Amino acid sequence: MKPPVDKGSLALGAYVYAVLAFIIIPLVIVIPMSFGTSDYLEFPPRGFTLKWYEEFFASRQWRNAMWLSVQVAFLTAISASVIGTAATYAMVRGRSSLATLFQILLIGPIIVPHIALAVGLYLFFQSIGLSGTVPGFVLAHTILALPFVVFTTASALGKVDANLEAAAMSCGASRFNAFRLITLPLILPNVVSGALFAFIISFDEPVVSFFLSGVRYKTLPRRMFEDIEQNLTPIIPAIATLLIVLSIIILAVAFLMRSRAKT
């Protein structure tokens, strides 16, 4: 006699496969289009060429946008990892009654729609002169990336015995030195993973960047939106393919670092 079919498991499995298809199908379409010989988007593509990748790297406008995105993402990764690690340490090791409120504020950028956050940041940055500047981009992207750094770091910090720091401080070390010499090396792989996540989030972020971009400073996602509106060519799928490859590489590095940390 066959066991009864678990309808809940079937529904969950169907949902998981539907989500995977929703994610994978656009990749199957976009990547081949980046190698097509036609001057407009078509699928399936006719022929094979690297023309659109060559045009991307040959264009000064595209290179400037890419370099700006790299700069902003790199600075965001540094600032988010430093602030996120300090915030995580305060939440995990602290005993403040405001810890719950602090956690809610940290995950706020995930809960609040990015369009609402973008409008608020634009109005605020416009009033203080940060709109359309590199510091403005870095500050805004740091706010968006902080929750992911905190989650990644907290998973490692929660497993570190606080008595190790207490033992170091009993030997004369300050709290900062105890953290720097004892705790930080143990959670460093997760901190670096959080920084890599912050880099990806900043590099690919389109909504907030669209509002904060000015005439002089335009990130790669903002430049892509403009090109889609004015001159839609296979150079857009080519850039999207490069972003996909970059994201896969960074995620793979983060996964390997966390795997080595567990072993």
Image (tube, rainbow, N blue to C red):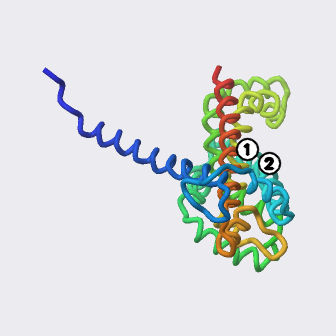
Which dot marks residue 232? none
Q: Secondary structure at mark 2?
A: helix
Most foreground residue, 164 or 157: 157
Residue shown at the point (55%, 64%) measured from the top left: 112
Residue shown at the point (79%, 59%) measured from the top left: 55
Q: Pinpoint residue 198: horizontal percent, then vertical percent.
A: 70, 49
Most foreground residue, 148 or 2: 2
Q: Pinpoint residue 74: horizontal percent, then vertical percent.
A: 80, 50
Q: Quadrant of the C terminus?
A: top right
Q: Pinpoint residue 255: horizontal percent, then vertical percent.
A: 64, 33
Residue shown at the point (72%, 32%) measured from the top left: 189
Amino acid type at image mark 1: Ala
Q: Secondary structure at mark 1?
A: helix
Q: Disc 1 marks which residue?
A: 195
Q: Disc 2 marks which residue?
A: 78
Density class for disc 2 (Cα within 10 Å; few <14, some 14-19, many ≥20) is some
In this rendering, is residue 249 above or below 60? above
Density class for disc 1 (Cα within 10 Å; few <14, some 14-19, many ≥20) is many
Residue shown at the point (79%, 75%) measured from the top left: 214
Left or right of 255 in this view: 137: right
In this rendering, is residue 177 above or below 50? above
Most foreground residue, 33 or 182: 33
In this rendering, is residue 216 above or below 157? below
Tell me how far mark 1 sits from mark 2, CA to CA: 7 Å
